[in-house]
Amino acid sequence: MKKLVEIKDVCKIYNPGENEVRALNHVNLTIGEGELVAIIGQSGSGKSTLMNMLGCLDTPTSGKYFLHGHDVSHMTDDEQSDIRNREIGFIFQGFNLIQSLTAMENVELPLIYRGVGKKERERLADAALNSVGLEKRKTHRPNEMSGGQQQRVAIARAIAQAPPILLADEPTGNLDSASSKEIMKIIKRLYAEGRTVIIITHDPGIAAQAKRIITISDGMIQSDIINPDYKED
C-alpha cells in the first residue's frame, strides 16, 4: 500500500515554558492510500490537534508531516491553503454551509476558489449531489433541509473534485441515529470506491465502523489496530 500520510515524531506545544501543554507528544503515524481510518479520543486527548495537522490547518512545533512524500509541516499559510484546496476534502460536524446559497451553490463554491470554469463546476457539483442522493434538493437552501440532508450537501462539497483525502471531523455529531447511519453508509461507500477516509470521533460506535482504529490519549497514540469486526456494507 502506497503511503499517503506520514507523520514523524510530531509534537505540538502550546504555551511553551512552565505552563506548557503538549497537545501532541512525539506522534508517529502512517496512513496508506485507500484506507478507512478512525482516530478516536476524548476531549483533550489531542485528536483535534492531530486533525488540524492532517488537514494542513496547523503546523507542528517539531517533527515532520509528509503528504504524498512532500514535507508540508512548515509550509507558509498560502502554501498550506493550496494543499488543502487540492488534496483534502473536509466534512465538519457543523456542516459549515452558507445559509443564503442553494445546495448546488454551496457545492460549487470551493470549485470557484480552485479556478474551475462554470460549466465544469456545474457538472462536478451536479454529479456530487447525485452521488449522495440529493437529486431533488439541489435548489434548496440549508434551512429547507434536515440535518442529514445538510451533511450530505457537505459531503458532496468535499468530494466534488475528488480530493485524495476525505477528513471527517465528528461527521455524525449533530445528527440523530437514523441520519448517522445514512451518513456512515455514504462514507463507507466512498471508501469502497477507493477514497482515503479519516474520521475523527469521540464515539466508539462510529469508530467501530472503520477498518482501522487509532486511539489517542494525552497527545500520544495508545493503540493502532485493524478492526477485527469490520464489515463491508
Image (cartoon, rainbow, N blue to C red):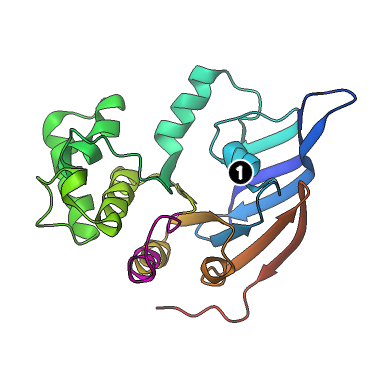
Crowd band around label 1 with a 10 angstrom C-alpha radius: few (<14), some (14–19), many (20+): many
Q: Residue visible at 23% across and 30% down?
A: 116
Q: Where does the image place residue 112, in percent across and percent down from the top left?
A: 24, 27
Tell whether position 174 is magenta. yes
Magenta residues span 171-184
> Residue 214's quadrant in the figure?
bottom right
Q: Which residue is located at x 67 percent, y 36 percent?
A: 65
Quadrant location of the N terminus in the rendered image? bottom right
Task: Give percent across and percent down for residue 101.
Answer: 17, 35
Q: Secondary structure at mark 1?
A: helix
List x then y, in percent, for residue 9: 79, 40
Judge by depth and name the residue closer to the eye, 107 or 176.
Answer: 176
Q: Which residue is mark 1?
A: 48
Would you place residue 58 above or below residue 153 in this image? above
**Does residue 62 appear in this view?**
no
Q: Is residue 57 one of those drawn in magenta? A: no
Q: Position of residue 70 (x, y in %)?
A: 60, 33
Q: Residue furthest right?
A: 18
